Each structure stands twice: as C-alpha cells, then as structure tokens.
Amino acid sequence: MTVPTGSQSKLFQPIKIADGKITLKHRVIFAPLTRNRGTPYNTESTAENPNRLWYPNELMAEYYRQRTTEGGLLISEGIPPSLESNGMPGVPGLFLPEQAEGWKKVVNAVHEKGGFIYCQLWHAGRANIPHMSGSPVVCPSATPWDDPNECYVYPPVGSTKQVPYADFPPIELTIPHLKKQIQDYCNAAKLAMEIGFDGVELHSGNGYLPEQFLSSNINKRTDEYGGTPEKRCKFVLELTDELAKTVGEENLSIRLSPFGLFNQTRSEQRIETWSHLCRCLKENHPRLSYVSFIEPVRPVLVPSYFFLTHPQLLTSPQRYEQIFSPAEKAQFLKSWGLETVDLSLFRSIFGSTPFFSGGGWDNTNAWEAMASGKYDALLFGRWYISNPDLVERLKSGAPLNLYDRSRFYGPFEDNEKGYTDYPTMQQSDPAKTVVEAI
C-alpha cells in the first residue's frame, strides 16, 4: 500500500487538543528547543558580579514568528520557573516582570500569525553548577555526577575553562524545599496563562529535575518520594496535580522520555516506573491537552545515497537529546531487556489523549509514522531550526535547508546567525539543501 505523503498525509489533517478547545490545522509541531538567545539583565557581567538573569527580546519574538503557521502549535524552549532552576546562560525565565513582558511579545508574535504556543517549564535540577544560580545545585538526593571528567559545557563567567559537574555535588531537597519547587512551577504557570500562552507543558524528560525523581540511579531517597517505582513517581504526580489546579488540566501537557539516557539517567525498572506514572496521570487528569514522548530509537528510513551526498550526517546523534551512538543505546536497551521497546504501551495507556512523538522525524520517515496510527502528531526540532517554513516544505515536497549544529546553542555576539537568517523556499540556495523527500 502506498503511504500518503505531502499534502495528502495525515500530517496535514486537523486535530483537537486542550480537551477540544483548540483545533490545530496540521500536526507538524514545533518542538521545544533551547537556543540561548536571551538578553542579559546585567550587561557588564564579571566574575565578581556575574549575570544570572535573562529576558526575551525582539530577536526571539522574530524567531518564533518566522516558524508560526495559521493553526499550528509551537512549544517554547524550556523556561525556568525560578533562578534556582535555570541551568544554562542565555535562557529567559518566567518569574520577573521584565521576563513576562518579553515572553508576552513572543506570544503576541505567534498569535498575530494565527498560531498557538505552549510554555514549557523546565528545571535543570542537578544538571547544573552553582555559578549559574548563585545557590547550591538541587537534586532529589545528594547524588554526585558519576563521571569526574564530564564538564558543564559553559565556563563560569570570568573563566575560559570548563568545570566538572562532580566538583559541585548537589544537595538533597528537603520536603519544604521540594514543596517550594512545586510552588515556583505553579507561579510561572499562572503567569504564563496571564500573559497569553495557550497552555503549559511540564518538561519531565531528558534527565532534568522531574526525571531525576523518576530515576533509580539518581533518586536514592527512602521517604515517600523514593525507594520504589511508585514512590519515585510521587513528585511528578504532585507537581502535575498542582499545575492542573493552577491552569486547568485541559491547558496542561507533559513531556516524557522513558528510555532516555541524557544527564546520566541510568534508571532501572523503566517499564514499572513510567507505566505507573502514566496510568496515574491518565486516571487523575483524563483531560490533559496532550502528552509528548521522545522515541527510544530513531527510525532510519533514508536511502543509502543520502549519506553518500551528506557523509557528515552519518556521525550525527540519532536524536537531539541522545548522547550515545545507536550501538551504545541498543546495548543499554538490551541490558534492561527492552531490545524491541517502543511507545505502544504508553499510547494504549493514554487512549484518546492526543499523543505526540519526537525524535528524528524528517521528510523521509514522517509519512509512514503518521500513516501507522501510532501517533497523533509529530514534533520537529532540528529541521524546524533551519527551515522556518518547514510546514510548507513538507506539504509541497520541497527540499530542506541543512542546519548548522554549531549555531544551535548560544549565546553569541551575532545571535541572529543560525537563528533568524535561514532562508524560506523562495530564498534558498539549492547547494545548501538536502535531497527531496522520497
């Protein structure tokens, strides 16, 4: 059977989210992407007085505007709900008036073009160093980084040398401190809705704070927040409950990576933990706007000649959050007895809740994925970075601009390069595009 592609694909059929309140005109979802392009509060940052706060600017508003389509959904980059939660420079939070004003400009830019935008809330947890927040790094348990040589990617202000995570072990969150994290999330979620975001997505994947609670190798607690799969889910479930009370469960979504390895998530009991979490989420919040999952394995559905013409892509990570090679990832899955794992269990648990998938989708493999019925929508990240008109390119079968990975994460002196200067179809140089869809 021929799989429909282009405009004939299910990718371009409407779908309802937010318990039917929002109708998307297509299922090409702009993925949450950290880009580190915020404006610093303190432009004279020094080692003695480092800047630790950023706010959104006009360039960011333009970036989101370029990638907006009528009836399309964009998910913001991870937005820290507090100073304590921010784990990277150039990332604007949502806990100060100037930040709210800046994010409102982004929201308005999206709405002016008829799009929808969700605010993704992100807490780095132990994937951080104290130089970023001016306070100790927090974690479910005081579990140090197990690789003494792995460094935080950005040198501290005033230095040119990276520092190892292991040199700054986290403190264990006390119960009151844990409750404060939940309140910070709720404060930011409330503010997000007040300034016009269409909903809130809780980032509970990629080894950040919520997933740190879920991970047995990081969460070593022996109280009600750790020790068993069910107890390790308690923080995420409580956080989701409070966010649902704050913004309404129909305006809330969650992102999960049950089989990820990023930020040293080496958890065992994957199926037991995440299946319990998802069953509780479905039971407690049946009207969630949507759920978003990261694929355990990226489908490789490109022709061999693609790699002959673009050999540099042979060594690219299989998923943007994946730091291991496909062989190494396969070995991890095998060690857990999950060689053939996919997302079907979670799809069945969530039933009619819109089910999104991210992890390597492009103009060669998206068509079969949508035709399979396994997913309701697909998230696109890297290809959306280099193709602001990705929706039209996919619909028409036009080739895609190659992306420049070295410009993914700022800050830069020339922040617009590799950010807002990618050409549309009408502006593209054929020499800088990849092969057309097959």
Image: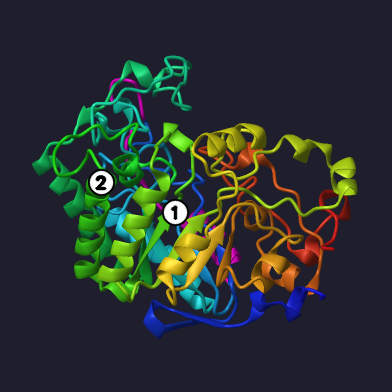
Residue 57 image label:
1
Which sits in the foreground, 139 or 215?
215
User: Which secondary structure, mark 1?
Assistant: loop
Q: Nearer the viewer, mark 2 or mark 1?
A: 2
Camera sees residue 79:
no
Quadrant location of residue 263?
top left
Type of amino acid under label 2 = Ser
Please name the residue shown 36% across and 29% down the image: 45
Decide which of tag 2 and tag 1 comes sooner along the chain.
1
Colour scheme of the rendered structure:
rainbow
Look at the image and give the residue range highlighted in magenta. Answer: 45-68
Q: Is residue 373 above or below residue 82?
A: below
Residue 102 image label:
none
Q: Is residue 399 above or below residue 137?
A: below
Camera sees residue 9:
yes
- The residue carrying mark 2 is 82
Q: How many marks?
A: 2
